[in-house]
Image: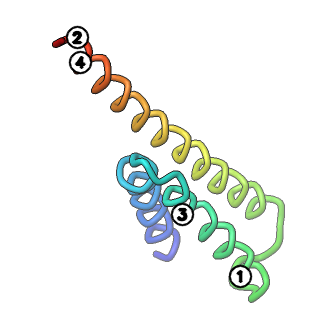
Amino acid sequence: MLGVFFVIGSIASLILEKYVLANNSHVWLGAIVPVLSIIFIVWQMLNDSMKFNTINVLLAVAYVSLNFIFWGQGNDLYHQRVVHKVYKSSDLQ
């Protein structure tokens, strides 16, 4: 059951990261989820809540990597929106 909550929470945080936090003009705001995920995973491993084995390390690396990928995609969405707005405003003149 804990695994199901982890997967649902992970998907929700990745979607929040891409479409809300990283999709704005404040670049640092998108860094909140990746940094918190790194802190959370290290804390879980230090407390022995998450055993330090190959599978867990690979899953942790994959999750943190996905966070940074979604952060980059969110920034790209913001920049595309800004470029589209500039292009549209210059097209009307």
Whether residues under marks 2 and 4 lie with C-beta atoms below 8 angstroms apart, the answer is yes
Whether residues under marks 1 and 2 lie with C-beta atoms below 8 angstroms apart, the answer is no
Q: Which circle's residue, 4 or 3, is located before the other in the chain?
A: 3
Q: Which circle's residue, 3 or 2, is located before the other in the chain?
A: 3
Q: Which circle's residue, 3 or 1, is located before the other in the chain?
A: 3
**Mark 1 highlights which residue?**
43
User: In x, y percent, where is residue 78?
Assistant: 40, 38
Dot 4 falls on a residue whose secondary structure is: helix
User: In x, y percent, where is residue 64?
Assistant: 65, 56
Whether residues under marks 4 and 3 lie with C-beta atoms below 8 angstroms apart, the answer is no
Q: Residue at x 48, y 40 (%)?
A: 75
Q: Which residue is drawn at 40% across and 46% down?
A: 23
Q: Residue at x 63, y 66 (%)?
A: 35
Q: How crowded is mark 3: few (under 14 residues within 10 Å), some or many (20 or more)?
A: many
Mark 4: amino acid: Lys
Dot 3 falls on a residue whose secondary structure is: helix
User: In x, y percent, where is residue 18?
Assistant: 43, 47
**Mark 3 highlights which residue?**
33
Q: CA separation, marks 2 and 4? A: 5 Å
